[in-house]
Image (tube, grey):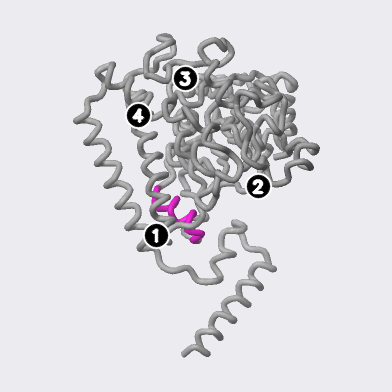
């Protein structure tokens, strides 16, 4: 994330954000979102009240129900993650509550043969593609049991560096094409990350080589404590695709059906040799940057006002109930199943054996280098000596 240098000089610690109505430059996520009905450039299927605004974008009922199930699974993980953190049973965790449609609607367009390159905030996307909950809990506990992905899943560990996943996703996409598959790679980034050099290099690289890659740009209004309007004057980040000769699509990121529709189109186009697409999902980071963050230091209540009414889970729930695809009774059964699934996974994660110090090196390379073997032996010897002295 690279904010305007003059802005950074004046406000090194990013004080409480100014009113959305008076903010200069970028119109801000709230204003852009509220303009969705008039903004023909932003794709929307469901209005915030759950009513259908684009019948032609409605997927099959089975898909709508599955999207809701995955969104509920993601939200349950996010909510339980907060509790586990406060209990000392989970490490610092970046919540994503309110962004479920943006993550589930995109990842649901993939298969397990495709690649997923998530940021640290994209736990919901990884869960949707099939990352086991127990393995995910282990990751956020900084346990080695969560450091490696299942053999049948092409999900990379959650990226902490900003934007490095974008060029790597292009490489994976080109490797799949060289192998003669129709598999694609999907990479996530935030609005702040779109100011990084890796973002632009990846789009240029993918466009020039027509890589089967789908780039997801989650515009959630904040790059840690810096509002989007402070780090760019661009009001439509999907337009950044124009400079690299690839399609750019702007979609309502709180609308799971619209997000799924545009992503499915981009994935199918990539599979058929049509090359990469940049998708900007317009959403909002309602939650803090991490569970250890205090957002009141850099944004006011006015910044987040109104977003509860745009909640993506409530929006799809209302639609499903009104369409007769779900009842309150069937939803209750679903929520009970999701809760039971999580508690079983939590028990599994709690049962993982305590890691040994040397395990920190076990998943660095597929084949350990001579240096790693030497370091591992030294760690084991030191650990054995410590145990001997404690005996």
Between the C-alphas of marks 2 and 1, the distance is 27 Å
Q: Earlier in the sequence, mark 3 or mark 1?
A: 1
Question: What secondary structure is found at the residue carrying circle 4?
Answer: helix
Between the C-alphas of marks 4 and 2, the distance is 32 Å
What mark, if any, has residue 155 been given in the picture?
A: none
- Residue lying at 63% horizontally and 77% vertically, measured from the top left: 378
Q: Earlier in the sequence, mark 2 or mark 1?
A: 1
Please tell me whether residue 49 is drawn above or below residue 158 in the rendered image.
Answer: above
Q: Which residue is label 4 attached to?
A: 66
Please tell me whether residue 212 is drawn above or below residue 44 in the rendered image.
Answer: below
Is the residue marked by circle 3 packed among few (<14), some (14-19), or many (20+) residues within 10 Å?
A: many
Can residue 142 be found in the magenta stretch? yes
Can residue 256 be found in the magenta stretch? no
Between the C-alphas of marks 3 and 1, the distance is 37 Å
The picture places residue 87, in percent across and down from the top left corner, at 39, 60
Question: What secondary structure is found at the residue carrying circle 3?
Answer: helix
How many numbered markers are drawn? 4
- Residue lying at 39% horizontally and 17% vertically, measured from the top left: 59
Please tell me whether residue 62 is drawn above or below residue 72 in the rendered image.
Answer: above
Instruction: Specify the segment rendered in magenta.
Output: 133-143
Q: Which residue is label 2 attached to?
A: 161
Between the C-alphas of marks 3 and 2, the distance is 29 Å
Q: Which residue is label 1 attached to?
A: 87
Q: Which residue is label 3 attached to?
A: 258
The picture places residue 328, in percent across and down from the top left corner, at 22, 28
The picture places residue 109, in percent across and down from the top left corner, at 47, 27
Q: Is residue 272 visible?
A: no
């Amino acid at each position: 994330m690279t904010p305007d240098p003059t802005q950074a000089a004046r406000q090194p610690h990013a004080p409480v954000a100014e009113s959305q109505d008076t903010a200069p430059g970028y119109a801000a996520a709230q204003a852009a979102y509220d303009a969705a009905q008039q903004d023909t450039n932003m794709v929307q299927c469901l209005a915030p009240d759950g009513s259908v605004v684009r019948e032609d974008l409605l997927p099959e009922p089975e898909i709508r129900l599955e999207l809701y199930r995955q969104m509920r699974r993601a939200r349950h993980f996010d909510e339980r993650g907060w509790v586990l953190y406060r209990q000392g049973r989970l490490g610092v965790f970046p919540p994503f509550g309110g962004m479920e449609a943006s993550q589930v609607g995109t990842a649901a367009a993939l298969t397990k043969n495709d690649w997923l390159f998530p940021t640290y905030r994209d736990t919901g996307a990884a869960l949707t593609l099939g990352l086991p909950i127990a393995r995910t809990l282990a990751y956020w506990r900084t346990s080695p049991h969560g450091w490696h992905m299942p053999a049948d899943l092409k999900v990379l560990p959650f990226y902490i560096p900003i934007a490095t996943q974008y060029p790597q996703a292009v490489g994976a996409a080109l490797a799949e094409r060289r192998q003669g598959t129709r598999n694609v790679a999907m990479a996530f980034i935030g609005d702040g990350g779109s100011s990084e050099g890796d973002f632009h290099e990846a789009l240029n690289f993918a466009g020039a080589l027509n890589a089967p890659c789908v780039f997801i740009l989650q515009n959630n209004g904040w790059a840690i404590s810096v509002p989007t309007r402070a780090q760019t004057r661009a009001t439509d980040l999907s337009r950044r695709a124009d400079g690299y000769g690839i399609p750019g699509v702007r979609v309502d990121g709180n609308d799971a059906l619209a997000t799924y529709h545009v992503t499915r189109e981009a994935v199918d186009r990539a599979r058929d040799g049509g090359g990469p697409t940049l998708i900007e999902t317009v959403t909002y980071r309602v939650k803090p940057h991490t569970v250890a963050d205090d957002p009141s230091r850099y944004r006011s209540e006015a910044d987040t006002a109104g977003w509860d009414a745009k909640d993506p889970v409530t929006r799809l729930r209302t639609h499903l109930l009104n369409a007769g695809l779900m009842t309150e009774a069937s939803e209750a059964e679903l929520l009970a199943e999701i809760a039971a699934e999580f508690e079983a996974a939590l028990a599994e994660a709690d049962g993982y054996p305590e890691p040994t110090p040397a395990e920190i090196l076990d998943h660095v390379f597929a084949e350990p280098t001579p240096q790693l073997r030497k370091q591992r032996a030294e760690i084991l010897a030191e650990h054995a000596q410590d145990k001997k002295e404690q005996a």
